[in-house]
């Protein structure tokens, strides 16, 4: 399969923006996190770390954060092994040096870098005894860990606004769920959207718009957008799916949908309430990641029982198998521009 032909302006922009795609792999020669040019070539092992999850680049592209447990930390993690979907939070430099565990507290999926790259917000069930969870902030270089929410209910999926002023997160207490925001020190906690009853079964996973004025989230079987200041949310989807990112035009959402073994990656126009499928098939509804120029999207697809990283143009068209390895490659994360030529 090949990608659709890209316009000369797009090719010029790509040349001015060097970036990498990080992904997890169970390759026998070294299971862990690899990095690869989006143009192809040989993948480079960044860190030997079986089962690495939640791969996220720092805003400046200098570091990668992820969840896993090193062999050296297995004994330290043993008392927490019963916590579901938890592991230690690590950071490593983009060249594979200076691997460090950020906190002794295990974290759950769904953490967020601060815009200045100095802190990470995460959720953990440790202090609540496993049934509930709270939101924490920790400095990337160690120290300064602070719990921002109480231990009553489930608080998860923290997401830092681009201006650094607010952290949004999903919250569930009994039969009530809410999308809430607070400052990075835990002050000014307030609900943006509150849902009760049968529609409140799912926990919102907020996605900030560029500029931090709007939030997108999935609730039940629908996708909504709402002002960060609150108000009535507006449904913008044509079916099931979960928002992954807000495009720079603030008019479209990158979405993912997974139903059993099938899935798709698609765009939703929040004004026209129309969607357009970019890629579909087994595994396509998992994690996806857009390029810093928003010309392509990386995603996982499973073909013949094997997971690989694929690329598709933001305009649609055929996809391209990027990794082509007999092992499973998954959870692609596209870096910011690591260098950019002056225009």
Image (spheres, helix red, strand yellow):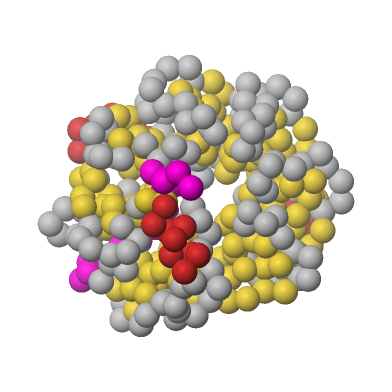
Direction from residue 287 to residue 255 in the image, left or right: right
Residue 229 picture quarter:
top right
Q: Residue at x 15, y 59 (%)?
A: 28
Q: Residue at x 44, y 61 (%)?
A: 12
Above or below: residue 108 compared with residue 278: above
Direction from residue 322 to residue 316 in the image, left or right: right
Is residue 178 in view?
no
Instruction: Please provide percent x and percent y for residue 52.
Output: 32, 48
Q: Residue furthest top?
A: 144
Q: Residue at x 75, y 43 (%)?
A: 213
Of residue 220 and residue 101, the one placed in the foreground of this image is 101
Query: Does 59 appear in magenta?
Result: no
Q: Residue furthest left?
A: 29
Q: Residue at x 37, y 36 (%)?
A: 62
Residue 56 picture quarter:
top left
Count all numbered tags in the image, as a single digit.
0
Instruction: Please provide percent x and percent y for residue 234.
Output: 82, 58
Q: Residue furthest right?
A: 232
Instruction: Please provide percent x and percent y for residue 67.
Output: 37, 42
Instruction: Please provide percent x and percent y for residue 57.
Output: 42, 43
Is residue 59 in view?
yes
In the image, the segment drawn in magenta is 325-343
Above or below: residue 7 compared with residue 85: below
The quadrant of the image that shows the N terminus is bottom left
């Amino acid at each position: 399969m090949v990608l659709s032909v890209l316009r000369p302006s797009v090719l010029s922009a790509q040349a001015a923006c060097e970036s990498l795609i990080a992904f997890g792999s169970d390759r026998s020669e070294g299971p862990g996190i690899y990095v690869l040019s989006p143009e192809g070539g040989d993948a480079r092992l960044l860190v030997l770390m079986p089962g690495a999850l939640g791969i996220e680049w720092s805003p400046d592209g200098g570091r990668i954060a992820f969840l896993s447990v090193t062999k050296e930390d297995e004994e330290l993690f043993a008392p927490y092994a019963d916590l579901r979907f938890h592991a230690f939070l690590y950071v490593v430099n983009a060249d594979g040096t200076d691997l460090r565990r950020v906190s002794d507290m295990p974290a759950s999926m769904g953490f967020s870098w601060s815009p200045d790259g100095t802190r990470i917000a995460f959720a953990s069930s440790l202090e609540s005894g496993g049934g509930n969870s709270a939101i924490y902030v920790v400095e990337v270089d160690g120290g300064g860990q602070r719990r921002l929410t109480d231990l009553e209910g489930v608080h998860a999926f923290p997401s830092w606004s681009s201006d650094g002023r607010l952290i949004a997160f999903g919250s569930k207490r009994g039969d009530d769920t809410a999308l809430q925001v607070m400052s990075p020190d835990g002050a000014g906690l307030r609900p943006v959207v509150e849902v009760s009853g049968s529609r409140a079964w799912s926990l919102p996973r907020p996605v900030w718009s560029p500029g931090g004025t709007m939030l997108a989230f999935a609730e039940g079987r629908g996708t909504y957008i709402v002002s960060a200041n609150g108000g009535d949310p507006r449904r913008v989807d044509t079916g099931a799916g979960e928002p992954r990112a807000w495009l720079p035009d603030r008019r479209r959402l990158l979405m993912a949908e997974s139903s059993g073994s099938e899935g798709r990656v698609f765009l939703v126009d929040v004004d026209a309430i129309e969607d357009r499928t970019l890629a579909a098939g087994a595994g396509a509804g998992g994690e996806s990641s857009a390029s810093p120029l928003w010309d392509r999207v990386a995603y996982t697809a499973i073909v013949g029982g094997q997971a690989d990283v694929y690329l598709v143009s933001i305009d649609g068209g055929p996809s391209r198998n990027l990794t082509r390895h007999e092992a499973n490659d998954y959870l692609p994360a596209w870096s910011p521009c690591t260098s950019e030529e002056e225009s």
